[in-house]
Image (spheres, rainbow, N blue to C red):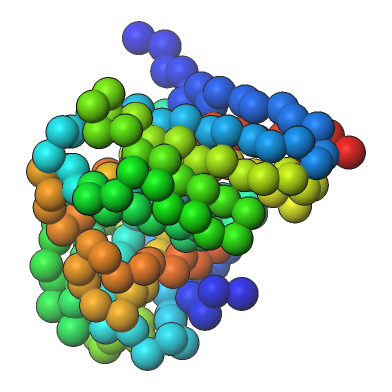
Amino acid sequence: ETGVTQTPRHLVMGMTNKKSLKCEQHLGHNAMYWYKQSAKKPLELMFVYNFKEQTENNSVPSRFSPECPNSSHLFLHLHTLQPEDSALYLCASSRGGGVYDEQFFGPGTRLTVL
Amino acid sequence: GESVGLHLPTLSVQEGDNSIINCAYSNSASDYFIWYKQESGKGPQFIIDIRSNMDKRQGQRVTVLLNKTVKHLSLQIAATQPGDSAVYFCAENKDAGNMLTFGGGTRLMVKP
């Protein structure tokens, strides 16, 4: 395993629901990332946190709200999603937040929005 | 309009043969490139990287070639094994920036 865990692994939600995705890394890394992998597009960066501070928001709609309480945990709060938000949401971590720092990915949460 | 899925090209090889997976990148200012492997049910896994001051880099059974003239990146896998079956995709740091942009991927299928 990569040292990055994600829960739940599968999630089905209605458009009016509120849910949260959780990511935890056991690697002692300082940077954490959320990515979206859908059937229609290549892997897309959503958010980056470095030392608990958000350093990148890749024009993500406000119905996705990230939270990073510490360097080991990252959450993605979901509210009023659309069916086109159905995708695999991947979390990653790296030692530093630079592009040369190898990113270690979790297995993802498969989200289906009805 | 009708939604369509991302079409993944597929490369089918015989076990023991060499595989070559290609990637065309878009940004001439990109100076760092990575190849990832993604097996079914798992997240992407780093395979090998290369910086733009190099043309070739070798790892264990894998070689990455970079042709900056035509903005082309390739991944060569020697003696392909069934465990190499996965989706492979490249990533670049557009405009020599700090974030990665990913390609669509190629599905490699290894026939025993």
**Vertical relation: B17 (above or below) B92:** above
Q: Quadrant of residue B111?
A: top right
Residue A107 position, x and y percent, is 55, 63
**Vertical relation: A24 (above or below) B55:** below
Q: Which residue corresponds to the image point at 62% horizontal and 44% vertical from the top-left?
A: B77
Depth order, front residue of B94/B75: B75
Residue A112 position, x and y percent, is 50, 45
**Vertical relation: A70 (above or below) B41:** below
Depth order, front residue of A24/B49: B49
Quarter of the image with the N terminus of chain A in it: bottom right
A19 horizontally vs A63: left or right: right
Q: Which residue corresponds to the image point at 54% horizontal and 74% vertical from the top-left?
A: A2
Depth order, front residue of B112/B65: B65
**Vertical relation: B80 (above or below) A92:** above
A89 horizontally vs B16: left or right: left
Q: Which residue corresponds to the image point at 37% horizontal and 90% vertical from the top-left?
A: A28
Q: Which residue corresponds to the image point at 18% horizontal and 43% vertical from the top-left?
A: B30
The reply to whether residue B104 is in sight is no
Determine the residue located farthest toward the right in the rendered image.
Answer: B112
Q: Quadrant of residue A97?
A: bottom left
Count of marks, rendered view: 0
Determine the residue located farthest toward the top in the rendered image.
Answer: B1
Residue A68 position, x and y percent, is 25, 79
Residue A64 position, x and y percent, is 25, 56
The reply to whether residue B84 is in sight is yes
